[in-house]
Amino acid sequence: MNFIKVYSLVLLVSLLLSCSSSRVEVAIIKIKGSDTMLPLTQILAEEYMVNNPGISIYVEGGGTSSGVKSLIRGETDICSASRGLKSDEARELADYYESLGMYYLIAKDALSIYVNPDNPVNNLSIGQLRDIFTCRINNWKQVGGKDLPVKLVGRNYNSGTFFYFKEHVLEGEEYCKSIEIEPTTADVIEYVLKNPNAIGYGGLNYGADVKMISVDNVRPEEENARNDKYPITRYLHFFTQRSPSGAVKNFIDWTLSPEGQKIIKKAGFIPLWQIKT
């Protein structure tokens, strides 16, 4: 066997071993759930993959309820959720896996109230919000605004934000039947911008173009949310079927690390503790 043949054989074996090694090292993580958290989860995934080239992370929205269902069916590794598990979801998870799964608090969010920039109202109480979204208040002049009918806009029924607002602001009461339902927070904002008498809600990091009003005289700001002064503050979660291991555990651990929390702050969400920049 001459030198060229030997060299070619060694090169071929090296390439095969390299390809085999790459296949062994690649791990796939699937994340599905909250539309509110979608931009955050995408940024976390992109940043993590930069420094971990053997990991591929696929991120999908669809709403918290959709993510929980996918988790129960074993179609996703992590469910991103803007609320806690409902009792029926916890029961179904336990029935499938004989476990309530694991949950991780990864960030906080101020659920902000959006109004049109031309709206003169700057503050509403929780009680006023409840009355507005249940149709007991239906004109802005009842809360110090213009003599205009209130137009309501909110998230869809699969949304963790929809459920959280109903539980914590409406105290379990039903939304007004006239509410306009939009699939994403971006759509809620677009509706508010087009309608001077509209009011909606969504995450703090989405509200650059609309007017975000105070609630109970507290501004929806990072520090107020971190210290729980802002009255509509919530945690954002990752859920898994069981205690995670391998690539999934490493990704969650990184998300909770100072490095991951810095990415959360950079993405416009609120880290679990104060981050030095």
Image: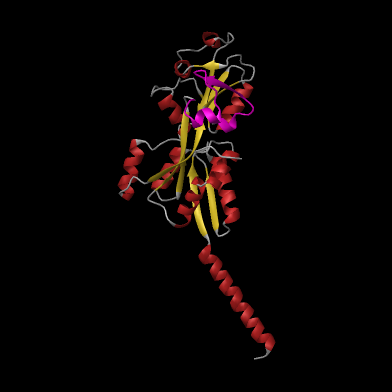
Residue 264: x %, y % from top left: 55, 41
Instruction: Say above or below: 188 vs 40.
Output: above
Tell me where the magenta segment starts and ends, as one range: 204-229
Quadrant location of the N terminus in the rendered image? bottom right
Q: Residue visible at 58% across and 33% down? A: 205
Membership of 106 in magenta stretch: no
Q: Left or right: 149 with respect to 5? A: left
Residue 257: x %, y % from top left: 51, 47
Q: Residue furthest right?
A: 4
Membership of 228 in magenta stretch: yes
Residue 124: x %, y % from top left: 51, 16
Q: Can you tell which quarter of the image residue 40 is in? A: top right
Q: Residue visible at 63% across and 23% down? A: 193
36 or 177: nearer the viewer? 36
Q: Left or right: 124 with respect to 117? A: left
Instruction: Say above or below: 116 vs 67.
Output: above
Residue 260 in sight in this render: yes
Here the colouring is secondary structure
Residue 186 in sight in this render: no
Q: Residue visible at 48% across and 56% down? A: 247
Quadrant location of the C terminus in the rendered image? top right
Residue 13: x %, y % from top left: 59, 78
109 or 83: nearer the viewer? 109
Q: Residue visible at 45% across and 53% down? A: 249
